[in-house]
Every structure is written in structure tokens, then in C-alpha cells.
Amino acid sequence: MIDSKKPAISIVIPVYNAARYVAQCLDSLVEQTFRDFEVIAVNDGSTDGSLDILRYYERKYPYFHVIDQKNGGVSRARNAGMAQARGEYLGFMDADDTAAPTYLERLYRTCVDNNAEIACCYYYYRFEEPSFLFQYPFRCHGVYNRTQAMNKLLHDTQIQGLMWNKLFLRSLFTDNNITFPAMKCLEDMIVMNQLFAHINRLAVIDEPLYYYTQHKESALGSINASKINDFMKAMVMVRLMLERGGQYEKYRRSYQALIRKTGVCCYLYVLRLHGREKCMQGCVRNLRALYRGFRYCTSEEFSPTAKAPELADQVVMPGKLEKDYYTIR
């Protein structure tokens, strides 16, 4: 039975075939120094026993709640969890990650003490193969207004479009009808740009309080053409958001910096993809398609009425190149 008293924080965790990791994730929440929170774990059609683990924690801890649904992807799972959230503040974790014991306490106090709609901390990268841990290096701290925060977010270095190292005033989502789009990669970035467009204050604490696990099953550990296309789709959607809000000229230079960084990542992902598949067919074509797409995103010819999926579907899997496949010309 759900307690009628609303918690200060709701934590949403999408879970898909994470039986190897999810107990460690949930244990790190059990050990939090801040106690006024609820956990909403969304089992997204797991087939590996994840649901049994979630049910165990739900029975043991009254502040754990489980939603069981058919597989629909991380965005659908997060949206389902948000719909059930009751906290004044909203946070997110991935099922294969963990948090430091003071993670919630530090983020919550940072929001409250600074009257900030969003608080952000830093994080550790935890690699499985080979096994090692290091802190994210590009760090800042302080309180920023909307313009400062948007510029830092678009540069995507000191502040990144990640959900899990931040705490949000939940009304940012509900008052502005913000939900996660159906994407396999960078859905966080789309949502983050929408959220930042409505804040007055962002507070950043220069402490790594989250442990992000990188492994071969993670979103970027299993890169494919569809995920690379989502990078392009995200860039299109961010430009559209800025254009429709009359803010593109204000943030032009920061957006161009985002395009440059994303472009380098995507070129490397294409090379990695073709190398993994041991097939170079279409590699040059894929690289050229990305170049044209990113160039269009920063051009004066960009249309505010553009359709993101049509502009984004540029990369095809090695060996599956179609003769008349759509490209931006």
C-alpha cells in the first residue's frame, strides 16, 4: 500500500534485463542518508528475472513501488514512472548504476538552499572491461541563471544532458507537459533542453555522487545505425526547439559547439560500427551523410517546420545500403 503522505523526492528507475545490476542499484538507495523519498521501478518487459528482484524490494521496503509493463523502451518506462510520481522533486537512475549515500541529501539541500529548480552533481565512470573507475573531468560549481545554464548545457561539457546526475522540481515536467520522446539515444538531451528553457536557477555542486556503469549492453556500448541516427534527430530537435522559442540567435555559438562535439562522436561511432561488422561497404557514404546532416543543422537554410525523423535517418547498417536511400543534399 502506498503511503498517503507525499514524499519529498520520487526516483524513477527504468529496468530492462538488469538482473546482474539492479540489486546493487536499489541497495545504494536503501543506504541513502536522506530518507523522505520513494522509488518507482518500472520493469520494461524484462525476461531475465529482474521483476522478481524488484518485487522482493517492494515487499521489503514500503517506499519501493514496481510498475510492470510490456517492453516499450526507456522513454516509455520513464514516462510511466513519472505519471505515478508524487514527490515535490523528481530524480532518475539507471538500473545498472549506483549512487553515493549522500546523493539525494546533497541534491535536495542544494535545490532548497539555492531556490533552484534543478540541482546537478558530478559522477564517476565505472568500466567493466577492463575494470576501472575515474571521475568525469570537466567540472564547475555555483548557481547559474537560465541563459548561463543553457549555454553550458549546449556546450555539453561542464553540464551535460543527462538525467541521472540531477534533481528536478517535478512541476517543471507537469506544468510544461514535458515527457520523454521515443528514442534509443539522447532522449535525455531533448528533455533537458526543454527543462532548462523554463528554469530560473540551476545549482551545481562540484562533487561526484553518482556511479555510471559503462558496459557492452549499455546504450552506447551496443551502437548501431538507429542509435547514431538518434544523435542526428536530437540535434534537429534541439535546433527546432530553439527556433520555435525565438532563441536560436541567442544560443547560436553554443549550439554550434554542440554540433561539433556530437559530429565527432558520430563519425567515430560510424567507424566503430563498420569495424565491428567487418564490412566497409557504405562507410564513406555514411560519413558523408552525417556531414551533410550536421552542416544543414547549423545552416541558414534550416527550416523551423522541418520533420526531425526525415532529416535524421541518414546512417544505414554496413552491408544494407539501399540504392535510393534518402539523404540531405
Image (cartoon, rainbow, N blue to C red):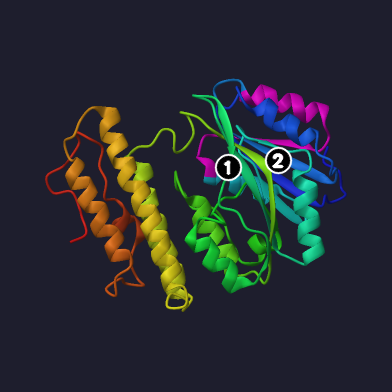
Q: Which residue is mark 2?
A: 40
Residue type, label 1: Ala
Q: Would you place residue 88 above or below residue 299 in this image? A: above
Horizontal relation, residue 57 to residue 162: left or right: right
Counting the numbered discs, the total is: 2
Q: Nearer the viewer, residue 35 or 156?
A: 156
Percent coordinates x, y for residue 179 in the rendering: 56, 56
The local crowd at label 2, few if under 14, some if 14 to 19, many if 20 or more residues have their Cα within 10 Å, is many
Query: Residue at the spot x=54%, y=57% of the render?
Result: 191
In magenta, the rendered stretch is 50-74
From the viewer's perspective, tell me whether residue 154 is left or right of residue 267: right
* Secondary structure category for the residue under label 1: helix
For residue 217, side relative to residue 66 (left or right): left
> Is disc 1 in contact with disc 2, using a CB cutoff of under 8 Å?
no
Q: Quadrant of residue 48?
A: top right
User: Does residue 228 show up?
Assistant: yes
Per the image, is 136 magenta? no
Q: Which residue is mark 1?
A: 77
